Amino acid sequence: MQEINQTKENKKMTLVFTYGTLKKGFINNHYMKRGIYLGSAKIKKQQPSLYNETAKEFDYYQIIIDKKYSVPYLFSLKKIKQEEKSFNHLHPEKVNHVKGDLFLLDDQSLEILDDFEGVPNFYNRQPLDVLVKQGNGEDIEEKNNDIKEMKQKLNQYKIPYFQNKDGIELTAQVYTCNINIKKYFGGFEKEVHSEYSLKDNDRFVDPDTDDVFGELD
């Protein structure tokens, strides 16, 4: 697995995209405290398929949120539809970009995060293409200033990116879930989303301890 990194003060930095409780302001963001926050981004819709790379097929990614614990899990759409027939109606071209945050992490932080995510048994960490969109309308000045600052940090750490008229594209490490969806979730009520919101975060319950971290309705 190729990682995007650069040495600074003898520390290798890796670009990581977070989409759930690790995001800025969310319940498990303390795992990112040693990292450098770059800003918000989206997972590019089409990604090279892990199921058939030789045929150059593409896959799409979405978040499954179980409504009992409000825990987010990122799966490829192909895996979702193969293992949970109730989601067969999802059409790849109609799903939205998964939203999240970008961070730079050193090796120690990445090792801690891998352990937290249960790599490689529960999650895999894999490279996916992400997008940072230019601003438009009322937010154009603020958004474009954020992108300017992000590009300065990317250049500082020599992180490669591609500039186009819509914004910038990068490759980041992303934690994707590799459990069997139907077997793991069982009878839990679940939904497919493109974003894990602060409301979802406030309803989060630790599946191991049943500790409630937010206010449940």
Image (spheres, rainbow, N blue to C red):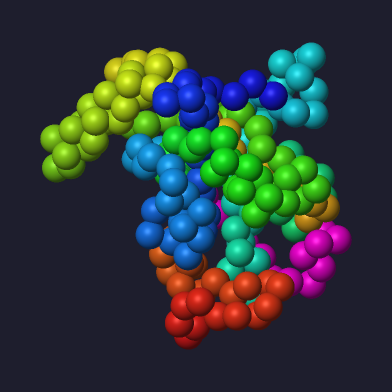
Above or below, 189 relative to 37: below
In which quadrant of the rendered view does residue 187 lie? bottom right
Name the residue located 51 percent from the left edge and 76 percent from the top edge.
Answer: 213
The one nearer the camera, 119 or 200, is: 119
Residue 94 visible in the current orientation:
no
Residue 145 visible in the current orientation:
yes
Q: Position of residue 216 (x, y in %)?
A: 49, 83
Q: Position of residue 133 (x, y in %)?
A: 33, 31
Q: Which residues are magenta?
A: 182-195
The one nearer the camera, 17 or 134, is: 17
Q: Is residue 87 left or right of 31 when viewed as pictured?
A: right
| Residue extending furthest toward the bottom | 217
Name the residue located 58 percent from the left edge and 69 percent from the top edge.
Answer: 70
Name the residue located 42 percent from the left edge and 26 percent from the top edge.
Answer: 9
Residue 189 part of the magenta-drawn span:
yes
In which quadrant of the rendered view does residue 168 lie? top left
Q: Position of residue 109 (x, y in %)?
A: 54, 44
| Residue extending furthest toward the right | 183
The one nearer the camera, 125 or 194, is: 125
Query: Looking at the rendering, in which quadrant would you find the N terminus?
Result: top right
Q: Is residue 55 left or right of 5 when viewed as pictured?
A: right
Residue 211 part of the magenta-drawn span:
no
Q: Position of residue 124 (x, y in %)?
A: 71, 40
| Residue extending furthest toward the front | 10
Q: Is residue 216 left or right of 211 when viewed as pictured?
A: left
Total numbered circles: 0
